[in-house]
Amino acid sequence: MTVDQLALLFALLVGAVVSVPVGERLRLPAPVLMTVLGIVLALLEFVPNVDVPPELILPLLLPPLLYAAVRRTSWRQFAANVRPILLLAVALVFVTTLCVAVVAHAIVPGLPLAAAVALGALVAPPDPVAATAVAGKLGLPRRLVSILEGEGLFNDVTAIVLYHVAIAAAVSGTFSPWRAGLDLVLSAVVAIAVGLALGWGTNKAMSALGDPTLQVALTLLVPFAAYVLAEELHGSGVLGVLVTALFLVEYATDADDVMARLAGHTFWDIVDTLVTGVAFGLVGLELHNAVETAAGHWGELLTWAGAVVGVVVLVRLAWLLPATWLTKRLHTSRDVGEDIPVSWRETVVMWWSGMRGVASVALALAIPLETDGGDAFPARGEIVFIAFGVVLATLLVQGLSLTWLVNRLGVRGDTEREMDFERQLALRAAKAAKRRLREIEQVEELPEELSEQMLRRSFDIGVRISPDIAEDERREALRQRALRLKRVRRIEGEMLSAARHEVLTARSEAGADPEVVDRVLRHLDVRSLR
């Protein structure tokens, strides 16, 4: 990588950090701002072209993005939403691929059916990062965000397998439906096996490591290992990452490992922010490829791209309306936890949230230059331009207008339901603390004063989470106590701050051991979190 390329990467990383507060102030999604930044950089003559091999874009960007997204979900959530996720992540990808392929084959001269299917597959899946990053910041109902997360995480699996089958057919000139179906099944089986095995092994390794720093470092390597290993064994790298991440989220969580959890949460927030920014910045930077392809015949290419954009957007709406109705009809009171849109307004928001992103651009750029016969890949330049047009139109038009649409339709999160669930968790936490106190009292003889004090603290554990669980009279007393505690913590915070400054001053003194100073400072930092 040249110095110019490193400078460009640094600019994208800085933009990724800055776009978050700027986006919050302008009420615009950070991924959309990064795409605009990439476009602006691509139009500047002194900015070098991106020199990243297309075959490396997905392995470098998708694993950490998918792993970070899965950390915010759970296997139970996916299992509860299997029907809406399958309708969107599998069925809709197939339908969109078919419709795009038919239209593209009909309007683009010289585009074979296999290449048209490849185009359909690479523009079919909405980007998981774009959907969750945009929709998750708008205060939407949690059920909608859950469905969008599930769709975004699993639709890439279906689309990428379809893409590889279509590319193989276009390159070789032969196609077998039975072989394609078998490849799809084997790809899923291999990926699931790799994900489960790697998840189990990682869980054991993390227990053996013990140190939070090493555990977090291991989690950074695991997504890449899952992707590469699954791909090497001819499985789905995306599905391998998802299965591994879901396994670790479900089984690698120690309730008492506070430091590892805090460190991991902070670390993956940073990774998610930086990699997301770079990914969407690269989408914008690929504008130069589209401009070079369109030189001399802008009118035809823009018409073809507009037609495919229309197909992608309209097919999603045409599919969502009956799919939502069917899911509601099949939904019963026994389907605990299943998230479905409850109104046409929520369905419209789901429709407009179907933005395409980095996966579509990466797959388009990864199309081979030649076929097995030595001929140029048919209409490769046209496919890349159309893919870029779809990504750009959906990201900018839908991404920039989604906030307006949500406000216009009045779709808001069910805060009362969330608060009720929070109260339930607060009560469960308080009862669990009380049960443990009773167990301790059966083994240890506690003074009556200490026992009463611990009993009050067991209840306070729940009240501090949700003050609404306390009675009115006690709530006022707790409020006064909270104010007093806040004052104590403020004073203690200033005392700890003075202690940290003194320790840091000692670090620059002659003869001071930096490691000892850092160990004492870490102790003070942990004390500040309590």
Image: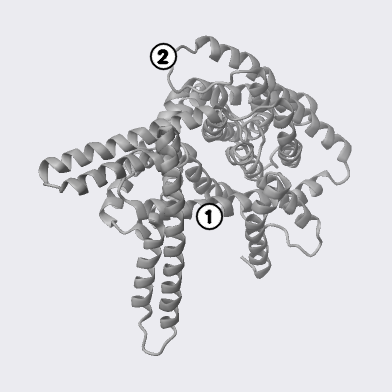
Q: Amino acid at mark 2?
A: Arg
Q: Residue 104 location in percent, x, y?
A: 74, 27
| Residue under pointer 2 | 334
Viewer-closest of 308 and 384: 308
Indicate whether 229 appears above or below 428. Answer: below
Near mark 1 (Cα within 10 A), the count class, few <14, some 14-19 or many ≥20, is some
Mark nearest the camera among 2 and 1 is: 2
At 63% from the left and 35% from the top, the residue drawn is 122
| Residue under pointer 1 | 270
Task: Please identify the quadrant where the C terminus is shown.
Answer: bottom left
Please identify the quarter of the rendering in which residue 253 is found. top left
Near mark 2 (Cα within 10 A), the count class, few <14, some 14-19 or many ≥20, is few
* Callout 1: SS: helix
Q: Are marks 2 and 1 in contact (CB under 8 Å)?
A: no
Of the two numbered discs 2 and 1 on the same chain, state the one appearing first in sequence: 1
Indicate whether 151 appears above or below 298. Answer: above
